[in-house]
Image: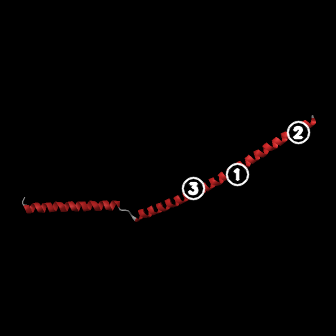
Amino acid sequence: MNRSEFILATAVILFVAFCLGWFASWLVNRFTRVTQADIGELERMAQSLHEAEETRDQAITYLQQREAEMTNQLSQTEAELRAAMDGLREARREAEELRSYIERKNV
């Protein structure tokens, strides 16, 4: 094998390797290509996710407001209960004083 044949054989081998690489690249590209339907589906999924996140955020905001209202209402109810208990305690004390006063007068 002389020098010219060696160069020609090397060139043919490199050309065949290039063609096989290009063909393999084309096949990979062909099978992994994203279609318009896939892009449309991804768009719909992204929109649905966005809407779900907005709904979740609204629900969290509503629950936080509701919790604040309920906490406020509970505080008011507890304050009213304390006032009522204080009033009842005062009324019992006055009733006891009146009973002892009546017993002292009747004796």
- Measuring 14% from the left and 60% from the top, which residue is drawn there? 10
Q: What residue type is labelled 3?
A: Ile
- Pointer 1 residue: 76
Q: Earlier in the sequence, mark 3 or mark 1?
A: 3
Nearer the observer, 99 or 26? 99
- Measuring 30% from the left and 60% from the top, which residue is drawn there? 27
Q: Which of marks 3 and 2 is nearer the N terminus?
A: 3
- Circles 3 and 1, Cβ within 8 Å, touching? The answer is no
Residue that extends furthest to the bottom in the rendered view of this protein = 36
| Tag in front: 3 or 1 | 1
Considering the image in quadrants, where does the N terminus appear? bottom left
Q: What residue type is labelled 2?
A: Tyr
Question: The residue tagged with tag 3: helix, strand or loop?
Answer: helix
Question: The residue tagged with tag 2: helix, strand or loop?
Answer: helix
- Pointer 2 residue: 101
- Measuring 87% from the left and 38% from the top, which residue is drawn there? 99
- Residue 80 spot, x, y in % from top left: 73, 49
Considering the image in quadrants, where does the C terminus appear? top right
- Pointer 3 residue: 60
